[in-house]
Image (cartoon, rainbow, N blue to C red):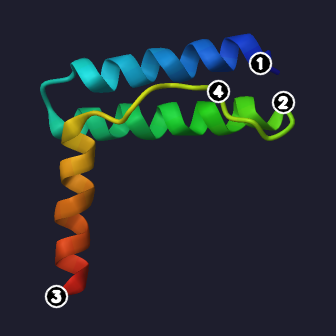
Amino acid sequence: MQTYRELVDLARSCATSARLSTSSAVAYEFWQMALEYQESAAKLNDGKPPAIGEPPIAVVRSAADYSNVLAK
């Protein structure tokens, strides 16, 4: 089992990798991993998720594109 600190470090590392990625697909995958680690850390911290920063623009843009497809 991983500790809270390890999960926070993993979440932040994945979030940083997502922001630095030049591929939107890779950024999305890293961001999903960051959210999973963040959720796991929150479970060890009375449900309070650690701060991992804002999602990369590529992920935000992809989510907006996806919601536009669903709306049609």
Q: Which residue is drawn at 44% across and 41% down?
A: 32
Q: Mark 2 or mark 4, which is nearer the start of the sequence?
A: 2
Determine the image quadrant of residue 69: bottom left
Q: Give the residue pinned by disc 1.
A: 4
Q: Residues within 10 Å of mark 3 (few under 14, many from 20)?
A: few
Q: How crowded is mark 4: few (under 14 residues within 10 Å), some or many (20 or more)?
A: many
Q: How crowded is mark 2: few (under 14 residues within 10 Å), some or many (20 or more)?
A: some
Q: Is residue 19 above or below residue 28?
A: above
Determine the image quadrant of residue 63: bottom left
Q: Which residue is drawn at 67% across and 20% down?
A: 7
Query: Between tags 4 and 2, which lies in front?
Result: 4
Q: What element carries label 1?
A: helix
Q: Residue at x 26, y 47 (%)?
A: 60
Tell which of 53 and 15 is nearer to you.
53
- Residue 70 spot, x, y in % from top left: 25, 80
Q: Is mark 3 on a helix, strand or loop?
A: loop
Q: Mark 3 or mark 4, which is nearer the start of the sequence?
A: 4
- Residue 50 spot, x, y in % from top left: 64, 26
Q: What element carries label 4?
A: loop
Q: Residue at x 83, y 29 (%)?
A: 45
Q: Do the residues labelled 4 and 2 touch (CB within 8 Å)?
A: no
Q: Are marks 2 and 1 in contact (CB under 8 Å)?
A: yes
- Residue 39 spot, x, y in % from top left: 66, 39
Q: What residue type is labelled 4?
A: Pro
Q: Do the residues labelled 1 and 4 touch (CB within 8 Å)?
A: no
Disc ID at residue 44? 2
Q: Give the residue pinned by disc 3.
A: 72
Q: What residue type is labelled 3?
A: Lys
